[in-house]
Amino acid sequence: MTNHTADVPPPAPAWRGFHHVALVTRDLDATIGFYRDVLGMEVVFVAPAGELHGRHGAVRPGGDPDRPGLHFFEYPRAPRFGPNDRSLEGAVFDPGATFLSHISLALPDEAAGVALHELLTRHGVRTTPIMDQGPFRNMSFMDNNGMSLEAAWPKESMTSTRVAPTIA
């Protein structure tokens, strides 16, 4: 009799999505302020420096209360970029020497995307045009650290007649 259990691969982990994305910033207060005051995200926590790292904090863009979302560590020697240090298009489509292209944040519909575009404009934050990307629409912008962010929402919920060209 042959034992076939060795031929059966183990089941894949039961992934539940992202728990958090860990990022660095030179100025934790300014970063928490941008995500809270401009983007309207919930501040999950701000913690003092510990034995292994500096101050850190997290903001949550909605969703599961068991997941902190974006977790920022204050690091004085972090790369110094500002939102005006390079072009938005360059940051999004040619990120250079970094492992991070961008972080995409989900919105429920076109109205939320247009409202965010207007909010960012009021705060002087540059954005790409709202783009048609197949099954979804999106736009890109940078945070106060010059990090590339994207807001994306399902195309099915479009109510606006504004359409920007597709960027591959």
Image (cartoon, helix red, strand yellow):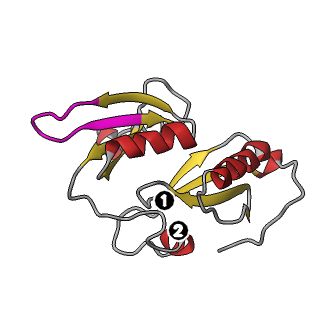
Residue with the mark numbered 2 = 92
Name the residue at 41% across, 28% down. 44
Assess disc 2: are there few (<14), some (14-19) or many (≥20) residues with their C-alpha within 10 Å of its C-alpha: many
Residue with the mark numbered 1 = 102
Residue 67 falls in image quadrant: top left
Is 148 placed left or right of 115 in the picture? left
Name the residue at 16% across, 41% down. 53
Chief secondary structure of the magenta span?
loop
Tell me where residue 78 appears, x and y as whole percent. Answer: 26, 58
Q: Amino acid at mark 2?
A: Val
Q: CA distance from mark 2 to mark 1?
A: 7 Å
| Whether label 2 touches label 1, CB < 8 Å | yes
Is 27 placed left or right of 76 in the picture? right
In the picture, the disc for residue 140 is none
Assess disc 1: are there few (<14), some (14-19) or many (≥20) residues with their C-alpha within 10 Å of its C-alpha: some
Question: Which span is picked out in magenta?
Answer: 47-58
Name the residue at 74% across, 56% down. 135
The secondary element bearing badge 2 is classed as helix
Tell me where residue 130 appears, x and y as whole percent. Answer: 72, 61
Residue 84 vertical position relative to residue 145 in the rendered view, above or below: below
Name the residue at 40% across, 57% down. 145
The secondary element bearing badge 1 is classed as loop
- Specify whether residue 56 is painted magenta: yes
Asked if residue 113 can be seen in this view, the reply is: yes
The residue lying furthest to the left in this view is 51
Tell me where residue 133 appears, x and y as whole percent. Answer: 71, 63
Is 124 placed left or right of 32 in the picture? right
Q: Nearer the viewer, residue 123 or 152?
A: 123
Q: Which callout, 2 or 1, points at the residue further toward the start of the chain? A: 2
Image quarter hosting the C terminus: bottom right
Q: Amino acid at mark 1?
A: His
Asked if residue 12 can be seen in this view, the reply is: no
